[in-house]
Image: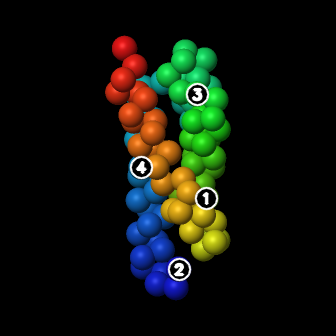
Amino acid sequence: MEDLRRQDSAALNVQRADEAPFDLGLPATSRDTFNLLAHHGVATPELTRALKAMAGFRNLCAPSGQEVDPSLLRQVLDHHLHDPHRFADVACRFP
């Protein structure tokens, strides 16, 4: 991505989408939250791994002054942008 504004916008939107599951009032860390959801059968192990990876990416995008590798951002956008939607779909169907 050569347009830095679009890159920043994409990274921020991925960060926002990834933060949505943490509004559940569960454990303080994202990893603990995803482990708990997997333990209770809400998320599959595969989805749990994907969400943990997205949380790691979110930490890279957080306002820490770190530059995000454009190729990593492209990989997330091309292959993992659907992961928060998959979580939302699973969570909405859970009793």
| Three-letter amino acid code of the residue under disc 1 | Leu
Secondary structure category for the residue under label 4: helix
Q: Residue at x 45, y 44 (%)?
A: 84
Secondary structure category for the residue under label 1: helix
Quickly name the residue at label 1. Answer: 60
Q: Residue at x 57, y 36 (%)?
A: 47
How packed is label 3: few (under 14 Cα within 10 Å), some, or many (20 or more)?
some
Quickly name the residue at label 3. Answer: 44
Q: Earlier in the sequence, mark 4 or mark 2?
A: 2
Residue 56 in picture, x, y percent from top left: 63, 49
Inter-mark Cα distance, 4 to 2? 20 Å
Farthest residue to the bottom: give it: 2
Q: Nearer the viewer, residue 59 or 42?
A: 42
Inter-mark Cα distance, 1 to 2? 17 Å
> Which one is in front in this view, the residue at disc 3 or the one at disc 4?
3
Quickly name the residue at label 4. Answer: 17
| Three-letter amino acid code of the residue under disc 2 | Met
How packed is label 2: few (under 14 Cα within 10 Å), some, or many (20 or more)?
few
